[in-house]
Image (spheres, rainbow, N blue to C red):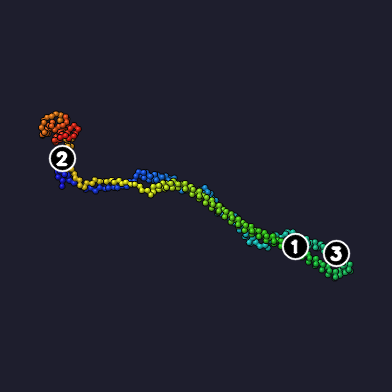
């Protein structure tokens, strides 16, 4: 309970205390540098585009994918032709055009020989033997002509057979060459495709290395930032603590007493209305009575009293 000498206790107010761990300036500056480097690294970095060799590989890829297709197509045609063609089908194309002329010439020459040589000789022999026109002469003539014809036919057959055999041999050789050409073109087409694919793979590989080198250049700022951020890793950073109290802690505190409030009000009124009384001379050697000041209470040549029994010097110091 408040009385005239002591005021009422102030209401208890809960205060809020905030504590914050504070790192030293050199460490916070270091972290700020890491943040700045990281931001710059993000700005400078990126993804490397396709390298020149990769772009070249992209352009060549459609052609390389079908490399050797022309050779393989021709090979298929030749192999198909050789596989579907038989020798008898084309043998006539390989017959010597002079064979028939040779056979005909053999027949003409044989007939001429009969007319010019054989028959005159048989007739002359018949006359000489006295059997010209006889059955015997006829038999001899017929036998001779049959022998001549048989011999001629044999020669002609042999000539035709030799020509046919030669034609078959040549046709077979050509068909075999056609097959071999098809097989050769097949190998060529496969080789062309393999060479193209191998070259394209190597080109792409080198292009990827170019791209990787460019990417490393873009990643370098971030890599350096990460390395820089680890320089103080493992070190114990000394830290301090900052405590901030919000709100008054009024428990156990009291407000001003009524007496102190009255005194304060009186002092305020005196300050406003100027109740100071200058003392410039000695008036009475007795003690202060009824607001009068005596010289025995004044140590300064110039003083004043405040009407409450207090005496001050010119500097405001209480002297009595």
**Residue 300 position in % (x across, y down):** 17, 31
- Marks 3/2: CA distance? 192 Å
Q: How many other residues sit within 10 Å of disc 1, few (<14), some (14-19) or many (≥20)?
A: some
Identified at 50% across, 50% down, the residue is 208
Pair 3/2: label in front: 2
Residue 242 vertical placement versus 81 (above, below) = above
- Marks 3/1: CA distance? 29 Å
Residue 181 location, quadrant: bottom right
- Marks 2/1: CA distance? 164 Å
Q: Disc 1 designates what residue? A: 159
Q: Disc 2 designates what residue? A: 262
Q: How many other residues sit within 10 Å of disc 3, few (<14), some (14-19) or many (≥20)?
A: few
Q: How many other residues sit within 10 Å of disc 2, few (<14), some (14-19) or many (≥20)?
A: few
Q: Is residue 42 visible?
A: no
**SS of the residue under disc 1:** helix
Q: Is residue 176 visible?
A: yes
Residue 70 vertical placement versus 154 (above, below) = above
Quarter occupied by the C terminus? top left
**Residue 273 position in % (x across, y down):** 17, 34
Could you say which disc has been placed on residue 52 in the image?
A: none
Residue 180 vertical placement versus 36 (above, below) = below
Q: Disc 3 designates what residue? A: 120
In-front residue for pair 266/160: 266
**Residue 244 position in % (x across, y down):** 28, 45
């Amino acid at each position: 309970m408040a009385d005239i000498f002591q005021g009422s206790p102030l209401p208890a107010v809960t205060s809020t205390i905030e504590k914050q761990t504070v790192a030293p300036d050199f460490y916070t500056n270091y972290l700020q540098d890491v943040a700045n480097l990281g931001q710059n690294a993000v700005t400078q970095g990126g993804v490397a585009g396709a390298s020149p060799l990769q772009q070249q590989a992209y352009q060549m890829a459609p052609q390389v994918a079908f490399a050797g297709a022309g050779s393989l197509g021709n090979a298929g045609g030749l192999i198909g032709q050789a596989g579907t063609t038989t020798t008898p089908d084309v043998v006539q194309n390989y017959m010597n055009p002079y064979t028939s002329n040779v056979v005909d010439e053999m027949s003409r020459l044989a007939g001429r020989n009969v007319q010019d040589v054989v028959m005159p000789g048989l007739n002359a022999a018949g006359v000489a033997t006295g059997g010209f026109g006889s059955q015997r002469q006829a038999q001899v003539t017929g036998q001779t002509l049959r022998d001549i014809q048989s011999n001629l036919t044999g020669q002609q057959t042999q000539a035709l057979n030799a020509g046919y055999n030669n034609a078959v041999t040549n046709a077979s050789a050509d068909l075999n060459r056609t097959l071999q050409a098809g097989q050769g073109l097949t190998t060529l087409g496969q080789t062309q495709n393999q060479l193209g694919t191998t070259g394209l793979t190597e080109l792409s590989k080198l292009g990827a290395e170019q791209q990787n080198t460019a990417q490393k250049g873009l990643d370098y700022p971030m890599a350096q930032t990460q390395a820089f951020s680890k320089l103080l890793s493992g070190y114990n950073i000394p830290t301090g603590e900052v405590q901030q109290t919000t709100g008054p802690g009024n428990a156990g505190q009291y407000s001003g007493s009524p007496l102190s409030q009255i005194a304060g009000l009186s002092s305020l009124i005196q300050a406003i209305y100027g109740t100071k009384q200058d003392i410039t001379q000695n008036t009475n050697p007795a003690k202060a009575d009824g607001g009068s000041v005596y010289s025995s209470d004044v140590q300064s040549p110039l003083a004043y009293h405040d009407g409450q029994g207090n005496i001050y010097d010119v500097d405001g110091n209480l002297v009595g």
